[in-house]
């Protein structure tokens, strides 16, 4: 019952998000589609000399084109304003079934202009960089966080906390610029652009891609793990003050065992929730970080789509990102309920 | 949570080193903003994106202070104004002579020099420019007659070091130098030792003579720009803009964006959450579902769509940032108000029949204020970095020089590849320092509000 209710809510949220996106870009999309029809009609007619020669004047020719364009716009249902319920409904229905249509300007590396192809080409690359980074960040973060929680007030703890606070106020993309400046130009260790310059089909591509992703990966992990460590530390510190831990200490169980088994286990629910959320967040990539490193993933696709106003791509990418996000919220909710039964009973 | 009074918080806060550090940084930033707003003319920031108004500045010049750290002194960019004037007249010929003194003490040649003047005359006076070098040698640079006019006119013009006439004149005097000067640029000749093509240090005097027959002519206004490789405290960028001005104007803008966005979104979130929690039942359910919708919107993509489709004005942007800022706070505020609602005195007040608005404003909100202050401080850096990020992508308000925008320009002109570190490092550090001030304050407050974390 609880799951079904949450699932239903999530679906509602998805629809509303989609609706907002469609409304925001709808009027522009309408103009672009109508222009497209106009061009299509014109090129079809000019390609056929027999029809062109049958006109006696330019006006007659223009009027004919106008008629044909209007007719086709009507056939396609574009004569109704873009905010009419039928059209929005149809658009949304198509999008839910992952039919995003054809991109206006952008193409995939293989030349397809189907939005679905483009998105599913970029997604694995984003997963490769950002999901790897997120996993590394969480592993390092949990370990360092637990370490500093077990020795509160020690040097390790103070360094971790201050590093977390300081690193969280630097924008990742700025650190990225500095890293490029330092390690790509001053000391030429890594390439400046993260996009490999050999074709995707060649066998060395994977190696080149891994080499190219080192610098962004280091940057993201360096800036990211501090706040994770701090978060884990704070959860753990809260739990370390609970009675059952103090009791265990009194019995004489070793401090390290308490930290890594009993305390960490109890800190698991919030940690897992955050992990689920950040994993799904990583799928969207990071628009600005990808722009800085020129990483050919979802973030850069999104940015390119927005700069050239390629609306089908914008809508498609937003939809996919929202779906991932909602699914992960849903999973995080379920996990939280599983690990901490108090939550389930709390809802009603 | 409830037992903390304002006095307690103040006392505790000033005990924490972090809090004091945060307040100190913030005070410096606020002072900087005030000084900027009062002392730097507003025109400089309105003209930020107008290349014409920066024409007298050097291109990508490094900060002056670098000269103190390195062995090789790079020439400073100098704009010499107010020349000393001497007038002489010999029956028919009137001579006005203008003299610029330049102390040149650098290890590299200047980039170029530009003499710009406006002169008032009639007829066609003769303008001569020459330079007396530290070794006493006088080099003729140019002699040209100004365009003829039979009435009194004001003529404005510029003489550039790249002028072919200057090179021609110098070639006539080439016997002074022991090396061939055919392929050397004019400024490298003028500022060179006679033995080899190396900079000659010392006092240079630039002389501009205006000869006029019968009528009096004069140069009303003139300046001599010695184009250097270093300029100002922060250097300049590719578009010749003084980065110090950009960085200074960025401070009040960042504080404005950060504070307005966070205060507004915390207030909104607090009201929303408390009302939902207090009302409970159906109202709570509906309001929280709406909250879920906003929470699920991918923030940065939506901000980008909004700024592209609606407007990228800085004030509209502040509004957009608020839309995504209040959600998290609303959730926490709701759960806190759920707890407070069950307390005895609130229930008592309910039984006495107090109005909802009074209950919320008088009994619940005050309890949440410490938490609210901490949230304001903690959410400022996010607002600043998000705006900086949007500007970095080129979606910011072009009429305001924000730090993100400076970084955007740096990225477009390939500052990293060209080693122009003074264009990349300072804006980022400013963003980070501003963020840090608020994070410090926020964390210090948070430690007081949630005492559990302090230990």
Image (tube, grey):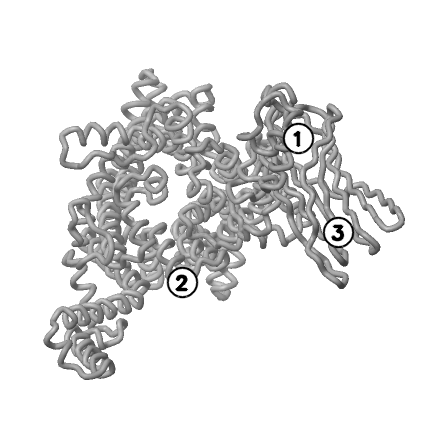
Residue B17: image x %, image y %? 57, 30
Please give left or right for residue A205 compared with residue B184 in the image: left
Residue beneath the point at 74% across and 48% down: B126
Relative depth, front residue between B50 and A179: B50
Question: In which chain is the residue bearing label 2?
Answer: B
Q: Residues within 10 Å of mark 3 (few under 14, many from 20)?
A: many
Is mark 1 in CB contact (under 8 Å) with mark 2?
no
Task: Give the mark nearest the N terminus, 1 or 2.
Answer: 1
* Residue B125: assigned label: 3
* Residue A164: assigned label: none
Residue A2: image x %, image y %? 20, 52
Residue B88: image x %, image y %? 87, 44
Question: In which chain is the residue bearing label 1?
Answer: B
- Say yes or no: labels 1 and 2 on the same chain: yes
Q: Residues within 10 Å of mark 2 (few under 14, many from 20)?
A: few
Q: Which residue is mark 1?
A: B173
Residue beneath the point at 25% across and 57% down: A315
Q: Which residue is mark 2?
A: B310
The secondary element bearing badge 3 is classed as loop
Relative depth, front residue between B158 and B344: B158
Please give left or right for residue B314 compared with residue A37 in the image: right
Number of numbered discs visible in the structure rendering: 3
The secondary element bearing badge 1 is classed as loop
Relative depth, front residue between A314 and A9: A314
């Amino acid at each position: 019952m609880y799951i079904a209710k949450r699932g239903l809510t999530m679906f509602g949220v998805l629809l509303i998000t989609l609706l907002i996106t469609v409304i925001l870009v709808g009027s522009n999309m309408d103009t672009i589609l109508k222009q497209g029809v106009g061009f299509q009609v014109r090129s079809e007619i000019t390609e056929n000399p027999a029809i062109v020669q049958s006109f006696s004047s330019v006006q007659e020719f223009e009027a004919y084109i106008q008629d044909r364009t209007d007719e086709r716009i009507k056939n396609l249902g574009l004569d109704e304003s873009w905010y009419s319920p039928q059209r929005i409904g149809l658009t949304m229905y198509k999008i839910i079934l992952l039919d995003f249509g054809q991109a206006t300007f952008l193409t995939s590396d293989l030349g397809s202009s189907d939005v679905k192809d483009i998105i599913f080409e970029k997604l694995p690359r984003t997963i490769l960089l950002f999901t790897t980074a997120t996993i590394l960040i969480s592993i390092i973060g949990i370990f360092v966080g637990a370490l500093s929680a077990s020795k509160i007030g020690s040097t390790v703890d103070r360094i971790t906390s201050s590093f977390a606070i300081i690193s969280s106020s630097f924008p990742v993309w700025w650190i990225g610029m500095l890293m490029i400046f330092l390690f790509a130009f001053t000391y030429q260790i890594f390439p400046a652009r993260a996009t490999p310059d050999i074709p995707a089909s060649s066998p060395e591509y994977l190696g080149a891609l891994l080499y190219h992703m080192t610098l962004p990966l280091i940057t993201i992990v360096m800036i990211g793990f501090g706040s994770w460590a701090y978060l884990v530390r704070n959860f753990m510190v809260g739990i370390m003050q609970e009675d059952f831990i103090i009791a265990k200490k009194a019995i004489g169980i070793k401090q390290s065992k308490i930290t890594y088994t009993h305390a960490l286990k109890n800190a698991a629910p919030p940690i897992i929730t955050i992990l689920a959320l950040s994993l799904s967040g990583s799928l969207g990539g990071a628009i600005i970080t990808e722009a800085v490193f020129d990483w050919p993933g979802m973030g850069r696709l999104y940015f390119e789509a927005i700069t050239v106003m390629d609306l089908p791509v914008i809508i498609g990418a937003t939809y996919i990102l929202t779906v991932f996000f909602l699914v992960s919220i849903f999973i995080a909710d379920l996990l939280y309920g599983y690990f901490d039964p108090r939550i389930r009973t709390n809802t009603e | 949570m409830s037992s903390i009074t304002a006095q307690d918080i103040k006392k505790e806060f000033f005990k924490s080193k972090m809090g004091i550090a945060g307040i100190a940084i913030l005070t410096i930033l606020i002072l900087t903003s005030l000084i900027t707003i009062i002392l730097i003319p507003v025109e400089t920031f309105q003209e930020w994106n107008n290349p014409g108004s920066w024409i007298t500045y050097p291109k990508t010049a490094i900060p002056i202070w670098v000269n103190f750290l390195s062995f090789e002194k790079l020439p400073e960019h100098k704009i010499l104004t107010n020349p000393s004037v001497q007038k002489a007249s010999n029956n028919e010929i009137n001579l006005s002579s203008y003299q610029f003194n330049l102390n040149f003490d650098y290890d590299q040649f200047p980039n170029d020099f530009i003499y710009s003047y406006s002169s008032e005359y009639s007829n066609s006076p003769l303008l001569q420019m020459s330079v007396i070098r530290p070794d006493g040698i006088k080099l003729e640079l140019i002699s040209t007659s100004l365009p003829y006019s039979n009435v009194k006119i004001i003529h404005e013009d510029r003489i550039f070091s790249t002028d072919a006439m200057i090179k021609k004149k110098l070639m006539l005097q080439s016997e002074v130098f022991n090396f061939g000067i055919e392929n050397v640029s004019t400024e490298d000749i003028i500022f060179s030792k006679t033995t080899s093509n190396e900079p000659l240090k010392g006092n240079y005097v630039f002389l501009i003579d205006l000869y006029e027959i019968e009528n009096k002519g004069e140069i009303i206004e003139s300046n001599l720009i010695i184009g250097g490789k270093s300029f100002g405290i922060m250097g300049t960028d590719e578009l010749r803009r003084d980065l110090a001005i950009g960085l200074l104007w960025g401070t009040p803008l960042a504080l404005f964006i950060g504070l307005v966005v966070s205060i507004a979104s915390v207030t909104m979130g607090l009201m929303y959450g408390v009302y939902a929690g207090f009302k409970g039942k159906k109202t709570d359910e509906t309001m929280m579902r709406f909250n879920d919708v906003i929470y699920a919107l991918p923030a940065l993509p939506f901000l980008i769509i909004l700024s592209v489709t609606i407007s990228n004005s800085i004030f509209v942007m502040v509004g957009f940032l608020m839309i995504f800022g209040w959600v998290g706070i609303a959730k926490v505020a709701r759960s806190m108000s759920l707890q407070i609602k069950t307390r005895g005195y609130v229930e008592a007040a309910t039984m006495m029949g107090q109005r909802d608005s009074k209950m919320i404003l008088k009994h619940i909100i005050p309890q949440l204020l410490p938490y609210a202050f901490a949230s304001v401080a903690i959410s400022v850096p996010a607002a600043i970095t998000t705006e900086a990020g949007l500007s970095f992508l080129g979606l910011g308000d072009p009429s305001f020089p924000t730090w993100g925008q400076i970084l955007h320009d740096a990225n477009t002109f390939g500052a990293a590849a060209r080693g122009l570190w003074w264009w990349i490092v300072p804006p980022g550090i400013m963003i980070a320092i501003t963020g840090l001030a608020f994070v410090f304050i926020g964390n210090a407050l948070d430690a007081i509000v949630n005492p559990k974390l302090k230990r």
